[in-house]
Image (spheres, rainbow, N blue to C red):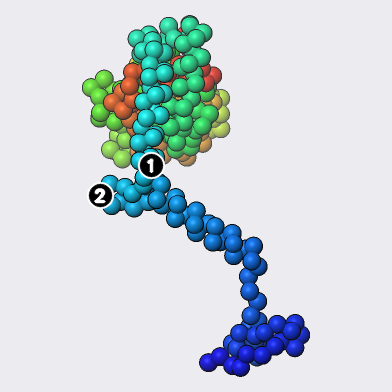
Amino acid sequence: MPTKIEKDALTGTDTTGHEWDGLKELNTPLPKWWLYVMYATIAFSAVWVVLYPAFPIQGWTGTTGWIAREAVVQEVAAADERMGPMMSRIRAATPQQIAADPELRSFAMAGGRIAFANNCAACHGAGGQGAVGGFPSLADDDWLWGGTHEAIRATIQHGIRAGESDEERTSMMPRFVADGVLTTAQAADTAEFVLSLSGRSTDAAGVERGKALYAENCASCHGENGEGNRDLGAPRLSDQVWLHASDKAAIARYIGNPRMGVMPSWGGRLDAATVNMLTVYVHALGGGEN
């Protein structure tokens, strides 16, 4: 219950009559300028409700008829009309022709950068640097399926092991240990031999044991000297570039039970012009080939 209103002895301000644990609340009104600003914002909001969409009653309220979503649709349509001629040229050209034409290349690089950020960067990184877990770098010169304009476009267009295109990139590495083809010890010896291909082996006996195992089980795809095979998407094993991991234990685990990555078929999600722009952009990231 409120106590008797009285003046505070220290400040001379009236109290509100409320007291908690001996603390009395002062009756200090808000500054008039603050109240006027609050009243003005209330009035402004009322005007805004009348003019612009606020409540979904039989459509939307608002006397101006302006709706943000419709405005965006109009802006997108205007942009499409403005860029239509260039997009038609990009759509009709090959990535090689686009890259050779300075005007088309400049347009494609700008559009490709946006398309890459929207669709590819989540896996491959903002700069195409790749990521741990099987997301290849697109900024180096190491390619699983080839780094020419034609090869890059085919990968973007049809995807990899996604089951969305009849022309998708498809390759599967056997689960050598999980399927009983090799024992865990044999997988470790094979991994030791793989390390020797890039000069990193520390177990000569393991290399010797793994050499025959590699020749029998791995060379048909990865090459006798680990040079890889782009027709099969088999990575090169004789360099210092690794998709998953480069230590012996990780390589042995991968031999035993590999993780096969999947990339969507972007041809079913993006139009031909955007695929071409992406191709030119990815090729220009640093690892493209002629």
Who's the residue at 44% across and 55% down the image? 46
Q: Toward the viewer: 106 or 237?
A: 106
Above/below status of 236 relative to 102: below
Residue holding disc 2: 58
Question: On the picture, is 174 further left or further right than 123?
Answer: left
Pointer 2 local density, CA inside 10 Å: few below 14, some 14–19, many at least 20: few
Who's the residue at 53% across and 29% down the image? 127
Who's the residue at 65% across and 81% down the image? 26
- Pinpoint residue 27: horizontal percent, then vertical percent: 64, 80
Residue holding disc 1: 64
- Pinpoint residue 145: horizontal percent, then vertical percent: 39, 19
- Amino acid tagged 1: Thr
Q: Toward the viewer: 202 or 285?
A: 285
Mark 2 and mark 1 lie on one chain; the one further toward the N terminus is 2
- Pinpoint residue 43: horizontal percent, then vertical percent: 49, 57
Question: On the picture, is 59 further left or further right than 141?
Answer: left
Pointer 1 local density, CA inside 10 Å: few below 14, some 14–19, many at least 20: few
